[in-house]
Structure formats: structure tokens, C-alpha cells
Amino acid sequence: MDELLGESRSVYVKNLPSSVTSLAILQEFKNFGKIKHDGFFLKNRQDTVVCYAFIEFEDVQSSRNAIKSSRVQLVGRPVYIEESTSPKTSFSLLMFINEIATAKIYFS
């Protein structure tokens, strides 16, 4: 119902250190609420030192709790948490971008 009102159960986590593990992220974010099965996506591009994640909770309140938290640190680095507009769209888009970034495309 809340998602119909524009609130998402998913959050975008940025400024993650490249050395962070999936387990560390999941352990930290389970403090805000139950994470949906298959509701986690981590992108770690060590070649460009870009690391971010999307986490989908089972309810909107858990997402709100994570967004309101301003003291989350992972591997000694503060991370930033924002509402994700659409987790399914975001996951699909991330997978597509990853395929393009790793593909060798030749133009004639």
C-alpha cells in the first residue's frame, strides 16, 4: 500500500569501500528490518573504485529506518543511504549496464 503512495521498500547505498563484503552489508542492514529474499545487489568495480548496493526490505518501515540512519559505517567509511525509486527497474538497469560495460562491441 505504501509503495502505491510513492514510498519504496528499496534503498540505494553509495560510498561503499571497495573492500566491503556482501556479508558485512547484509549484517549491518538487517538491523533496520528483514531483507527480502534476493533483495540485495552489490556492484563493486575495483578498476574504477566504484562500489554501491541496492537493498530491498520486506516492508516500507525498514526502508525508512535505513534512510533515517545517519551513522552507518562499513569498513571505517561512512555510507550514504537514499530511497531507491524502483528496485526491479534498478536491478534490471544495473544488469544491463554491467553487460554493456563488460561486452566487447565492434562497430563497422
Image (spheres, grey):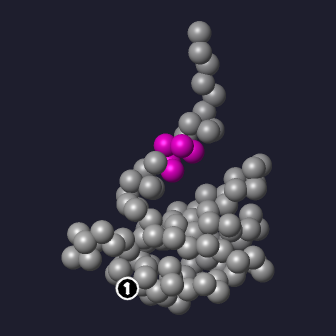
Identity of the residue furthest to the bottom in this view? 31
* Magenta extent: 94-98
Question: What is the three-letter code of the residue carrying label 1?
Answer: Gln
Left or right relative to 86: residue 108: right
Q: Position of residue 58 (x, y in %)?
A: 36, 79
Q: Is residue 96 magenta?
A: yes
Q: Position of residue 30 (x, y in %)?
A: 51, 85
From what the image shows, is residue 39 above or below residue 90? below
From what the image shows, is residue 93 above or below residue 3? above
Q: Is residue 30 magenta?
A: no
- Tag 1 secondary structure: helix
Residue at the image position 21 percent from the left and 76 percent from the top:
1
Residue at the image position 46 percent from the left and 70 percent from the top:
83
From what the image shows, is residue 43 above or below residue 39? above
The quadrant in which the C terminus is found is: top right
Left or right relative to 99: residue 5: left
Left or right relative to 25: residue 41: left
Residue at the image position 60 percent from the left and 33 percent from the top:
103
Q: Residues within 10 Å of mark 1 (few under 14, many from 20)?
A: some
- Looking at the magenta stretch, what is its main secondary structure? helix
From what the image shows, is residue 30 above or below residue 13? below
Q: Position of residue 33 (x, y in %)?
A: 44, 87
Residue at the image position 57 percent from the left and 65 percent from the top:
53
* Quadrant of res 81: bottom right
Q: Position of residue 18 (x, y in %)?
A: 74, 64
Identity of the residue furthest to the top in this view? 108
Per the image, the residue denoted by label 1 is 61
Q: Is residue 93 visible?
A: yes
Q: Is residue 37 visible?
A: no
